Amino acid sequence: MPLIAIPLTTTEREFLVQGLSQWKGPARPTEALSALFGYKDTAALDAGFERIQDAIERREPLPAEDWHRTLLATELAFASDLHGAGTEWSTVTRFSDTESIELLRSLQHKLAGLL
C-alpha cells in the first residue's frame, strides 16, 4: 500500500493526535469498534492508534487506510458521547467545539477522498 504525505498544519496534526489519544481516555473502544477500524481487538486498536499517532507527530506519510482510521477515530472521539469523548471533548483537549468543527471540516476535505 503506498504511503501518502498530507500537508497538514501544526494545529491539524495536534487535533488528529488528540482524536487518537482519546481512545486511551474518555473514548470507549469496544471489540465491534475495533473491527470497524480494521483491528482484531481493542489491544490491536490501541497499538495501531499509537503507531499512527507517532507517525503523525513525526510528520511521516501513512497509507490511505491509516488516514481514514485517524479521521474516523477523531470524528467519533469528538462527536460521540456514547463511544467518544463527546461532551467532555473541550475539557480533555485544548480545542473548543467551534474550533473542532472547523478543523474537522478542513481535515475531512483533505482526508476523506483518499481511497
Image: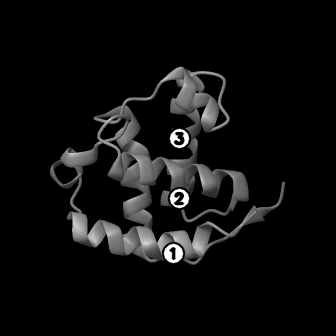
Q: How many marks?
A: 3
Label 3 sits on what residue type?
A: Phe
Read off the residue under disc 3: 49
Residue situated in front as seen by the camera: 106 or 92: 106
Question: From this viewpoint, is residue 54 visible?
Answer: no
Q: Position of residue 9 (x, y in %)?
A: 45, 77
Q: Secondary structure at mark 1?
A: loop
The kind of residue tagged 1 is Leu
Q: Position of residue 51 (x, y in %)?
A: 57, 42
Distance Cα–Cα, label 2 vs label 1: 9 Å
* Mark sitting earlier along the chain (3/2): 3
Q: Could you say whether the residue bearing mark 3 is in a helix, strand or loop? A: helix
Residue in the picture at 35% in, 36% down:
27
Q: Residue 63: percent from the left, percent from the top?
A: 73, 56
- Closer to us: 1 or 68: 68
Q: Which residue is mark 2?
A: 56
In this view, which residue lies farthest toward the left?
91
Q: Are marks 3 and 1 in contact (CB under 8 Å)?
A: no
Please say if the residues under marks 2 and 1 sit with CB atoms less than 8 Å apart.
Answer: yes
Left or right: where does residue 1 sit relative to residue 52? right
**Considering depth in this image, is 56 or 20 the residue closer to the camera?**
20
Q: Quadrant of residue 39?
A: top right
The residue under label 1 is: 8
Disc ID at residue 45: none
Mark 3 and mark 1 lie on one chain; the one further toward the N terminus is 1
- Circles 3 and 2: CB atoms closer than 8 Å: no
**Helix, strand or loop at mark 2:** helix
Whether residue 15 sits left or right of residue 45 in the image: it is left
Residue 27 seen in the figure = yes
